[in-house]
């Protein structure tokens, strides 16, 4: 939600974002971790990959479904902090762009 608010606020300010947002969303699908497990990555790549907040949620779901049978790597706090920060920035950006919003 925070990423969507940020993209919406940027789209209100910059017209190019209307064309970039679909591309960015399609790029985010494969890096979300839905198509592969973080445990399959080598350790040095795993640490860098887990800097992205999206795989943590997928790994939490995976841990809930498969439990102890599959090794999972996630942090609960890391994506929550990212979500809170992105929500705040996104809402601030939308609030600052209220003069550009047309309500019909």
Image (tube, rainbow, N blue to C red):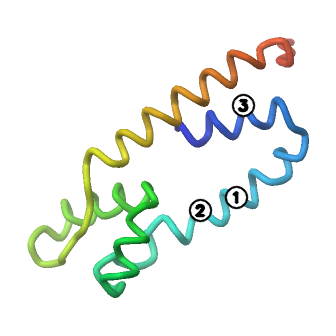
Q: Is 42 located above or below residue 75 in the figure?
A: below
The residue labelled by disc 3 is 9
**10 Å crowding of disc 2: few (<14), some (14-19), many (20+):** few
Q: Is residue 84 left or right of residue 72?
A: right
Cβ atoms under marks 2 and 1 closer than 8 Å:
yes
Q: Quadrant of residue 12?
A: top right
Q: How many marks?
A: 3
Secondary structure under tag 3 reads helix
Q: Quadrant of residue 94?
A: top right
- The picture places residue 17, in percent across and down from the top left corner, at 82, 45
Q: Residue at x 86, y 18 (%)?
A: 100
Residue 28: which numbered mark, if any? 2
Q: Quadrant of residue 24?
A: bottom right
The residue labelled by disc 1 is 24
Question: Of callouts 1 and 3, which one flags the residue occurring earlier in the amino acid sequence?
Answer: 3
Nearer the observer, 35 or 28: 28
């Amino acid at each position: 939600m925070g990423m969507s608010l940020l993209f919406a606020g940027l789209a209100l300010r910059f017209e190019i974002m209307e064309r970039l947002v679909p591309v960015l969303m399609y790029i985010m699908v494969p890096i979300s971790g839905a198509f592969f497990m973080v445990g399959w990555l080598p350790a040095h790549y795993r640490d860098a990959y887990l800097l992205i907040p999206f795989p943590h949620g997928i790994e939490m779901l995976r841990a809930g479904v498969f439990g102890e049978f599959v090794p999972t790597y996630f942090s609960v706090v890391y994506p929550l902090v990212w979500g809170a920060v992105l929500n705040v920035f996104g809402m601030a950006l939308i609030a600052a762009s209220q003069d550009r919003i047309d309500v019909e």
